[in-house]
Image: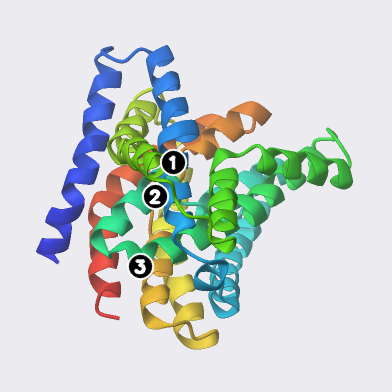
């Protein structure tokens, strides 16, 4: 386990570098926003395209994997929603708490970390988890929030969510990569070199961007934050593990990657979404900060356990 911890430590050290740069003012808020845009639209997209272009849909897609991840995630989602109802929260707040309990930082943290720790064979399962998070759960939170606040009908909310997905560079780059692979288009060497060089900036850029973004948020509402952190870092990987290992048996390596993805801290883009809809963004930001700090230890433990699979 110490060996795994030492391998994950540089990833969190880069997050700490970004946090320090943000807190000291070395990175202004504008600089952080531009760094995040560069990673999101360019570096990470190049990395995802290169990975997807070397995979086929048959290598990525597996029904047992899909059902296991969705079953485990929706159990946690339902528990969070029921507790939120008992606490008297609105549907919009309920939706964001449930979303926070199951959506980890797969894009910025999971892909570079697990590709290194578990090998490039982990990329396919990670991409499938990312796709489900973005399409299914990403659409669900938008539909619930906009419908409950009277912003639009469920049909219009779904249409808006689909448009957002089609404009998401992660979805676009994965789709383009899979199309490239499906048609067996030879990768022209200059193009391969281009996406390789640009994609190489994704890992350090994404991790520094995570830390820098964390430096701009305030840790208020710590009781709900610890509750949501416990759901995300503990209950979510356990629920997914039960579903993947016993209910919908998944190939052991892919199951291990899925469980590791479920153990990742809360995704930073949830705060942006909560801020956009003005649904308790401080509580979400506190959950992101707390879960990221605690995950320094918990991710290493989960990865060490799943590597035994």
Q: Position of residue 80 (x, y in %)?
A: 58, 58
| Image point (43%, 13%), residue name | 30
Disc 1 on helix, strand or loop? helix
Q: Looking at the image, which is closer to me, 191 or 71?
A: 191
Q: Quadrant of residue 66?
A: bottom right
The disc, 2 or 3, on the residue closer to the chain's N-terminal end is 3
Q: Quadrant of residue 11?
A: top left
Q: Residues within 10 Å of mark 2 (few under 14, many from 20)?
A: many
Please give the residue where the numbered disc 1 appears in the rendered image: 46
Q: CA distance from mark 3 to mark 1?
A: 18 Å
| Image point (74%, 45%), residue name | 162
Please give the residue where the numbered disc 3 appears in the rendered image: 121
Disc 3 on helix, strand or loop? helix
Of badges 2 and 1, the one in the foreground is 1
Please give the residue where the numbered disc 2 appears in the rendered image: 265
22 lies left or right of 156: left
The disc, 2 or 1, on the residue closer to the chain's N-terminal end is 1
Q: Residues within 10 Å of mark 3 (few under 14, many from 20)?
A: some
């Amino acid at each position: 386990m110490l060996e795994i911890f030492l391998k994950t430590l540089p990833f969190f050290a880069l997050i700490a570098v970004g946090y320090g740069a943000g807190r000291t003012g070395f990175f202004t808020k504008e600089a952080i926003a531009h760094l995040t845009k560069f990673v999101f639209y360019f570096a990470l997209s190049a990395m995802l395209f290169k990975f997807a272009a070397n995979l086929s849909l048959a290598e990525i897609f597996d029904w047992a994997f899909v059902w296991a991840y969705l079953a485990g995630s929706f159990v946690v989602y339902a528990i969070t929603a029921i507790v939120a109802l008992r606490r008297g929260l609105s549907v919009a707040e309920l939706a964001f708490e449930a979303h926070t309990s199951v959506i980890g930082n797969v894009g910025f943290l999971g892909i570079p970390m697990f590709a290194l720790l578990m090998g490039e064979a982990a990329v396919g399962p990670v991409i499938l988890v990312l796709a489900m998070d973005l399409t299914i759960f990403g659409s669900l939170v938008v539909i619930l929030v906009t419908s409950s606040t009277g912003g639009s009908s469920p049909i219009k909310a779904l249409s808006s969510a689909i448009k957002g997905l089609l404009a998401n560079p992660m979805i676009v780059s994965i789709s383009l990569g899979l199309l490239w692979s499906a048609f067996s288009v030879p990768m022209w060497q200059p193009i391969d070199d281009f996406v390789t060089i640009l994609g190489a900036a994704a890992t350090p850029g994404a991790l520094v961007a995570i830390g820098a973004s964390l430096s701009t948020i305030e840790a208020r509402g710590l009781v709900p934050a610890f509750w949501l952190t416990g759901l995300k870092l503990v209950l979510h990987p356990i629920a997914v593990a039960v579903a993947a290992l016993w209910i919908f048996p998944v190939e052991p390596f892919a199951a291990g990657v899925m469980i590791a993805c479920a153990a990742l801290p809360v995704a930073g883009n949830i705060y942006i979404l909560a801020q956009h809809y003005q649904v308790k963004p401080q509580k979400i930001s506190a959950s992101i900060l707390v879960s990221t700090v605690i995950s320094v230890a918990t991710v290493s433990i989960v990865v060490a356990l799943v590597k035994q699979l």
